[in-house]
Image (cartoon, helix red, strand yellow):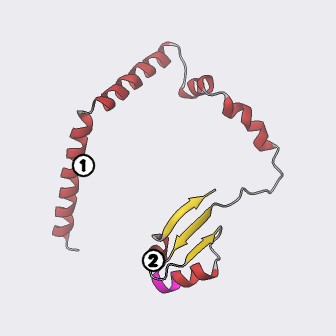
Amino acid sequence: MSLLNEYMQMEQQLKQLQSNMEKLQNDKRLQSELEFKERLESLMKEFDKSAADVIALLDPKPAAGAPRAASAPAGARRKRKLKIYKNPNTGEVVETRGGNHKTLKAWKDEYSSDTVESWLVRVEE
């Protein structure tokens, strides 16, 4: 891509971003959230509290759940997520929890890794 084309593309992106910013600035929801943020920061300063203090006050559950994580066996890993791919050319479906799946490797060799990753249908726990 020539430098001029790159410049024109970036200029177009900048105009789009500026247009999006103007829309956001006129959005009542954003104004409300900004006002809330300002008031919250003001209260935090008034009572000399940090964001972590406020989070701990409002959501004490993570602190209670922390010891549970320490009781996990040493060296134990959490289960990998199940990834489901569907080849649009053949309709074949592959479900895998790791990158060593034979069919998936063959697809990546044939179609490229980026293309195969675009075939990702969903990810499950």
**Residue occupying image coordinates x 56% and y 24%:** 54
Q: Marks 1 and 2, how far apart in space?
A: 34 Å
Q: Residue 56: within the magenta? A: no
- Residue type at numbered disc 1: Leu
Which mark, residue 88?
Answer: 2
Rendered image quadrant of residue 97: bottom right
Q: Residue furthest front?
A: 91
Indicate the secondary structure of the residue bearing disc 1.
helix
Give the class, few, some or many, for how many residues have Cα within 10 Å of label 1's Cα (few <14, many ≥20). Answer: few
**Residue occupying image coordinates x 78% and y 40%:** 68
In this rendering, position of residue 77 left or right of residue 84: right
| Residue closest to the eye, 7 or 84 | 84
Indicate the secondary structure of the residue bearing disc 2.
loop
**Residue occupying image coordinates x 45% and y 82%:** 89
First in sequence: mark 1 vs mark 2: 1
Which mark, residue 17?
Answer: 1
Quadrant location of the C terminus in the rendered image: bottom right
Rendered image quadrant of residue 49: top right
Relative vertical location of residue 82 with respect to residue 1 in this rendering, above or below: above
Quadrant location of the N terminus in the rendered image: bottom left
Q: Position of residue 40 (x, y in %)?
A: 45, 21
Q: How many marks overall?
A: 2
- Residue type at numbered disc 2: Pro
Give the class, few, some or many, for how many residues have Cα within 10 Å of label 2's Cα (few <14, many ≥20). Answer: few
